[in-house]
Amino acid sequence: MQLRLKNFLLPCYVVLFCIFLYLPIIILTIYSFNEGGFPAQWKGLSLCWYYDLFASIEIWRVFLNSVFVAFMAAFLSVTFGLMLVYGARKFTTNIASFFYSNILVPDIVIAVGTLSLFSYFMVPLGLITLVIAHTLLGLGFTIPILKARLDELDPRLVEASLDLGASAWYTFYHIVLPFLYPAILVSTLLVIIVSFDDFVISFFCAGSSAQTLSLYVFTMIRSGISPTVNALSAIMLLVSSIFILVISLLQVRLAAHDESK
Amino acid sequence: MFEEFKKLIKSETYFFLITPAYMWQIMFLVLPIVFVVVLSLSAGQGAHLVQSFTLQNFYEVFQLSQIRIVVRSIVLASTTAIASLFIAYPVAYFLALHIKRFKFFFLFLLSIPFLINVLVQVYAWFFILEKNGVINHVLMMLGLVEKPLNFLNSYFAIYLVMFHVYLPFMIMPIYSSLEKIDTRLIEASYDLGASFRTTFWNIILPLSMPGVQAGFFLVYVVSFGEYVIPSLLGGLKHFFVGTLISEYFFIGNDWHLGAAFICLSCGILFISAILYYVFFNKITVRSKVIR
């Protein structure tokens, strides 16, 4: 009897946990279809807030800003990460550990530090400073992922290629890059998500001109709520979920590949 | 000229490959942090330095009201980290050791709250905690309360949402360290007649300790500087370290004081983290002694 109770208790606990984790998100999604707009009452199913959202010019501008920053940051941090990981592959010290600090240092310290440095050197705040800060953030995610993957590559493959007369560039392009490809994709998507999600660093480093989605949502929540936020949040939720699904699928494939080896 | 340059690149390939990432790290992480320390030790307007060296800022910041806010943040971070550790461990344990199929699906389910926008998560809580939100609706329907309770702008709301947002940060590291455990060790322990309790304390927990520590310190440090949740859910009454820093920089416009406050609170954070670290090591050693 006791054993059966035990077997039953843990799954129940996990289910409750998942409900707690998901309840707010689900309620938010449901209410984004509410005609009444605000929590108060349920006034019937409607897509009106979605129409409002897509009709707004402001939101498209903000969205394009976010896309620009996210893609630039992803491109730069993956490129730099690749260069570092490949260049340092023979080093005995663990080069990735230096970059963990980007995740571990509280956001607000990075944000304040970069803000004061930029304003000391009179760098105008805007999208460029955002890209710089988000690239820094991204390096903390890309380098550990890429390094873990590169460590699995048999170094003899690279040596064989070089021995057989291939140039360093040819070897990189035809041996290393295809092997790293899934990890590159995962880290790119991850940096895009992280950049889209980041609020604190954007809040300090964006200045007044450049707005990103996170900042836009924040000001909308702060300054009396327009129900278009509901629709916007639901869409952001959906998009991140799709990205995360792709990431998890890729990681499953990576794991399966490793086992088959 | 060009040829020479090419030669240089070829002979120093490693150096050129490594430079950009390290440069970025040094210019935009190390240098800013050093600059904050410099700001805290000088006086002037905004980011400009007028007086070269002074401890005046620290005198002004080192006061009871500020220390109280730092302590409040420490309590918040500790509570969040400890509570989410206890709640998250069984879930990670279940996922890593009990689920055989659909593991991918469960991991995906846990990654969504881990990676979605914090603002969206906080905003979603508004629907539940609001004056005419879901909780009040349910309470009124059950007849437990006469008029709607006010949940927003309170410590309760802040703690609840902090806890909700940081739970997934705790699960991931614990899960990955539990996943790495060789299941044969656990089976051997059972085969040799050990009970579940003995197996857990002597095998599973010590082997998952690296994940527990990683999760704990990640949540502890990151939630210490939290800005979004206190500023949206706490109103203007409840100040924490993150909100006070932004107050110094945006509203008070006194960057030097703000920098001094950052140094002060990071110092206290560092000391408390070391204390926790020592504590964790003691636990680990003790559980090894029992064995």
Image (cartoon, grey):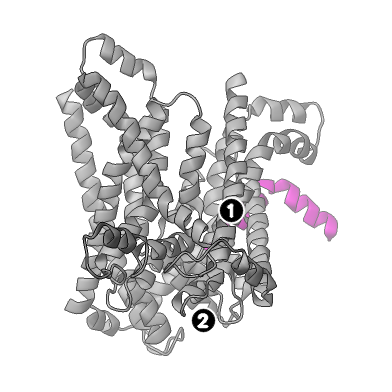
Q: Secondary structure at mark 1?
A: helix
Which residue has dot 2 on it? A120
Taking depth in this image into account, of A154 and B121 the one nearest to the observer is B121
- Residue B128, how many percent across, how many down? 37, 61
Residue pictured at 42% horizontal, 90% vertical: B45
Q: Is residue B41 above or below residue B196?
A: below
* Chain part drawn in magenta: B1-27
Q: Is residue B116 shown to the viewer in this render?
A: yes
Specify the quadrant that holds the C terminus of chain B: top left
Which residue has dot 1 on it? A238
Dominant SS of magenta comes to: helix
Which picture quadrant has residue B134?
Answer: bottom left
Which picture quadrant has residue B234?
Answer: bottom left
Residue pictured at 39% horizontal, 71% vertical: B232
N-term mark: 1 or 2: 2
Task: Please report, as a chain letter, where disc 1 is located.
Answer: A
Task: Please report, as a chain letter, where disc 2 is located.
Answer: A
